């Protein structure tokens, strides 16, 4: 992980330098998508990068979860355009040595899972490790731009980059809801839930629970919201969460060190999705920080 962190920091610093020089840009394609796609697929072992395919693959997967609405229908229609590229480049023989993908296929060789399960896990890393990280980084920049006083705190102490990201995850819940199926008859909060019942877990509501988070509807870079549900919990915890945290920490540290202010150029536009709370576009201006 330390090698990855160094690579993440180098790429984040170069990207933020470029964006400061550019001044005005769209956070979604130019930062939130550009950074994870430039570092994470290579860490998995992909030798060819198609930004659009990788980002759309995640959106496709989360919209396909349902409900069976227009968003899901549109996602399923796009599947034949996206999946062939993903399937081809996640095969064992297509991956470069030394990445997460090689480790997963080695587990198949050891009998810990099947070859098909290994391929599915590699694809899952890309679906969950790109789109949700894109969303988390974009949402974090939105939080900082919307709360300049909190951005000033981060600038004074760039070590708050990790807590600032955790708070953005709690505050915006990149995965706003998810469905589960009750495996046994159970009771939650006095409500009987029969086996096989479909349950909608609204993570966004849980992360704004005032009983758990005092002043929950305020974004605070120094809150350190241990226990938020943005990455799931227990056996349903995100397997790539530590990589996502490392990526976001690199980006926010670079921003804190190099950017003087983050100013909205136009009103942010949010993207409808069945499970993801993501920006579609957010034009901002980075000004150079005076040392």
Image (cartoon, rainbow, N blue to C red):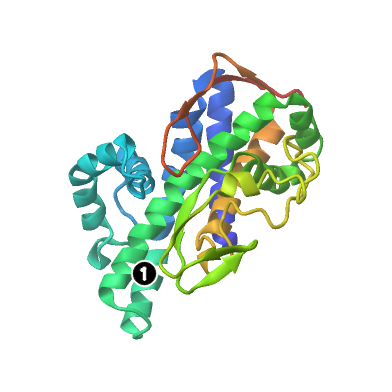
Where residue 238 appears, x then y in whole percent? 52, 60
Q: Check disc 1 and report its element: helix, strand or loop.
A: helix
According to the picture, the residue beneath numbered tag 1 turns out to be 102
Mark 1 residue crowding within 10 angstroms, few (<14) / some (14–19) / many (20+): some
> Could you tell me which quadrant the N terminus lies in?
bottom right
Q: Can you say whether 15 is above or below 175 in the image?
A: above
Q: Quadrant of residue 96?
A: bottom left
Q: Nearer the viewer, residue 218 or 99?
A: 218
Q: Is residue 94 above or below residue 39?
A: below
For the question of whether residue 249 can be seen, the reply is no
Residue at 40% x, 67% y: name it: 196
Q: Is residue 39 left or right of residue 60?
A: right
Q: Is residue 201 left or right of residue 61?
A: right
| Quadrant in the picture for the C terminus | top right
Q: Is residue 256 visible?
A: yes
Q: Is residue 10 above or below residue 148?
A: below
Residue at x 45% of width, y 44% of height: 275
């Amino acid at each position: 992980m330390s090698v990855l962190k160094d690579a993440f920091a180098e790429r984040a610093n170069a990207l933020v330098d470029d964006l400061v020089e550019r001044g005005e840009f769209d956070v979604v394609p130019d930062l939130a998508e550009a950074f994870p796609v430039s570092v994470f697929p290579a860490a998995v072992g992909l030798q060819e990068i198609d930004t659009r395919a990788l980002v759309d693959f995640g959106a496709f997967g989360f919209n396909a979860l349902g409900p069976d609405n227009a968003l899901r229908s549109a996602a399923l229609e796009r599947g034949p355009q996206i999946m062939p590229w993903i399937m081809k480049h996640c095969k064992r023989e297509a991956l470069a040595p030394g990445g997460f993908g090689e480790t997963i296929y080695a587990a198949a060789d050891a009998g810990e899972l099947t070859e098909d399960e290994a391929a599915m896990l590699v694809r899952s890393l890309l679906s969950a490790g790109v789109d949700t990280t894109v969303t988390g980084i974009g949402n974090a920049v939105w939080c900082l731009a919307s709360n300049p006083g909190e951005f000033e705190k981060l600038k004074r102490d760039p070590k708050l980059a990790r807590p600032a990201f955790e708070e953005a995850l709690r505050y915006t819940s990149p995965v706003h809801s998810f469905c589960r199926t009750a495996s046994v008859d159970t009771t939650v909060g006095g409500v009987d839930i029969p086996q096989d019942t479909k349950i909608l877990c609204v993570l966004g509501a849980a992360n704004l629970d005032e009983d758990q988070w005092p002043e929950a509807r305020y974004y605070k870079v120094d809150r350190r919201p241990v226990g938020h549900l943005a990455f799931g919990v227990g056996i349903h915890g995100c397997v790539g969460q530590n990589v996502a945290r490392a990526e976001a920490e690199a980006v926010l540290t670079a921003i804190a060190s190099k950017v003087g202010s983050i100013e909205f150029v136009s009103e942010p536009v949010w993207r409808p999705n069945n499970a993801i709370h993501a920006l579609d576009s957010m034009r901002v201006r980075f000004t150079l920080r005076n040392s």
